[in-house]
């Protein structure tokens, strides 16, 4: 396997991962490592991350004090909810599935329609939605100001600043940027461990990058182009307008999800592969941006094996965040948490991986 260095990280040569005849036009596949970029006006500190984590899991930020961000983004489920679609305060399904928060710090926009560009801006949206958390952000600030515990945490995280929702959003966003997923079999393979991926997964990666054409939209370290596309997914229960374009989802940890597509319509990765193989299921009068692929059953199995190789082992950025000063991609962290079971997607404590 030929590897070369580009902008500080290793990528497979274009001859391996590019589309036929399109070398240099489509970004390749890259390993993911390091620390997500932080905005210049919200540099990370340990105190800020700790405050954000407390707020993320505290029901103080919901109208009835019975729900937190962590209600739908459960730590034990890798910050998903385990449901096909989100569950609302009114005890009914929401129109879209709950997004995965791992690697959200590298995303260029938020929500499936990409309507918000930063994590700080995103924080208020679930609160303002009466079906999600149903709380005026300013009421949330009033609650926090009257809580001695949070008064102390804010003083440590934002010295000499009055508690405001802008600071609430900065704290929660800082915590969310610590949620990552990398050191997958795929990452290890790209970084030189030829035995990290199975033969089936390697064949699947080649299909992904050639006949299946997935790499046109799923590329780079996150396996997403961060753009909006219409892939012919049928809308559910009258929710959504046919033909609406949605953001390309990162494929990392895709086999750990409980449903797929923006509305949770598909319940297995095999259904997703079949959808793309058939060229989508757009209703009459609408045309998807994909075409039938003609994949064999063994090729579908290989694609699934490749997607399985994207399950990460590292799920929290370790180290001192006070050194991350700019919005650029800093160097890789020097250690990881938990222990390595040897299985793709298991937790890892292998500093040598991050130093390679």
Image (tube, rainbow, N blue to C red):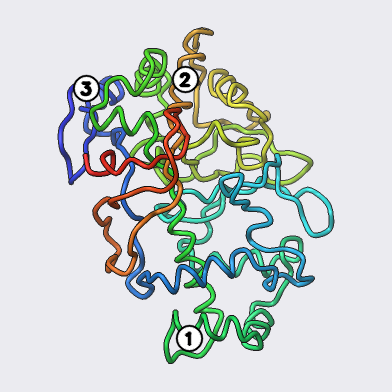
Residues packed near mark 1 inside 10 Å, few (<14), some (14 to 19) or many (20 plus): some
Q: Position of residue 45 (x, y in %)?
A: 38, 71
Q: Position of residue 225 (x, y in %)?
A: 39, 42
Q: Quadrant of residue 174?
A: bottom left
Using the image, determine if residue 194 lies above or below residue 103: above
* Element at label 1: helix
Q: Quadrant of residue 62?
A: bottom right
Q: Position of residue 260 (x, y in %)?
A: 61, 35
* Element at label 2: helix
Quarter of the image for the N terminus: give it.
top left
Q: Which mark is residue 15?
A: 3
Instruction: Answer whether labels 3 and 1 touch (C-beta < 8 Å).
Output: no
Residues packed near mark 2 inside 10 Å, few (<14), some (14 to 19) or many (20 plus): many
Q: Which mark is residue 155?
A: 1
Q: Residue at x 45, y 82 (%)?
A: 156
Using the image, determine if residue 185 lies above or below residue 236: above
Q: Which residue is mark 2?
A: 305
Q: Position of residue 243 (x, y in %)?
A: 61, 40
Describe residue 213's horizontal placement relative to residue 328 as left or right. Answer: right
Image depth: mark 3 or mark 1 in front: 1
Residues packed near mark 3 inside 10 Å, few (<14), some (14 to 19) or many (20 plus): some
Describe residue 101's horizontal placement relative to residue 57 as left or right. Answer: left
């Amino acid at each position: 396997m030929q590897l070369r260095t580009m902008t500080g990280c290793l990528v497979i040569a274009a001859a391996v991962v590019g589309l036929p005849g399109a070398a240099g036009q489509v970004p390749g596949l890259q390993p993911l490592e390091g620390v997500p970029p932080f905005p210049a006006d919200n540099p990370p500190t340990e105190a800020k991350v700790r405050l954000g984590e407390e707020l993320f899991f505290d029901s103080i930020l919901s109208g009835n004090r019975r729900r937190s961000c962590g209600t739908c983004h459960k730590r034990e489920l890798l910050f998903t909810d385990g449901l096909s679609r989100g569950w609302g305060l009114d005890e009914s399904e929401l129109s879209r599935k709950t997004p995965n928060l791992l690697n959200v710090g590298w995303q260029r926009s938020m929500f499936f329609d990409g309507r918000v560009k930063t994590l700080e801006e995103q924080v208020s949206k679930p609160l303002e939605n009466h079906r999600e958390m149903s709380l005026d952000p300013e009421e949330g600030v009033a609650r926090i100001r009257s809580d001695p515990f949070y008064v102390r945490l804010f003083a440590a995280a934002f010295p000499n600043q009055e508690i405001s929702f802008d600071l609430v959003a900065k704290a929660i966003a800082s915590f969310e940027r610590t949620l990552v997923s990398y050191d997958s079999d795929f990452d290890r393979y790209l970084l030189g461990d030829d035995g990290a991926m199975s033969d089936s997964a390697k064949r699947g990666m080649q299909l992904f990058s050639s006949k299946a054409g997935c790499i046109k939209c799923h590329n780079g370290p996150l396996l997403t182009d961060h753009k909006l596309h219409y892939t012919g997914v049928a809308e559910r229960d009258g929710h959504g307008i046919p033909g609406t374009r949605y953001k390309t989802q990162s494929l990392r940890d895709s086999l750990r999800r409980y449903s797929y597509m923006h509305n949770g319509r598909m319940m297995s990765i095999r259904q997703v592969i079949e959808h793309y193989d058939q060229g989508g299921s757009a209703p009459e009068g609408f045309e998807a941006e994909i075409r039938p692929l003609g994949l064999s059953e063994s090729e579908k199995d290989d694609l699934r094996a490749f997607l399985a190789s994207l399950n990460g082992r590292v799920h929290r950025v370790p180290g001192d965040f006070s050194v991350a000063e700019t919005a650029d991609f800093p160097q890789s962290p020097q250690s990881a948490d938990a222990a390595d079971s040897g299985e793709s997607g298991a937790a890892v404590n292998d500093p040598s991986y991050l130093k390679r």
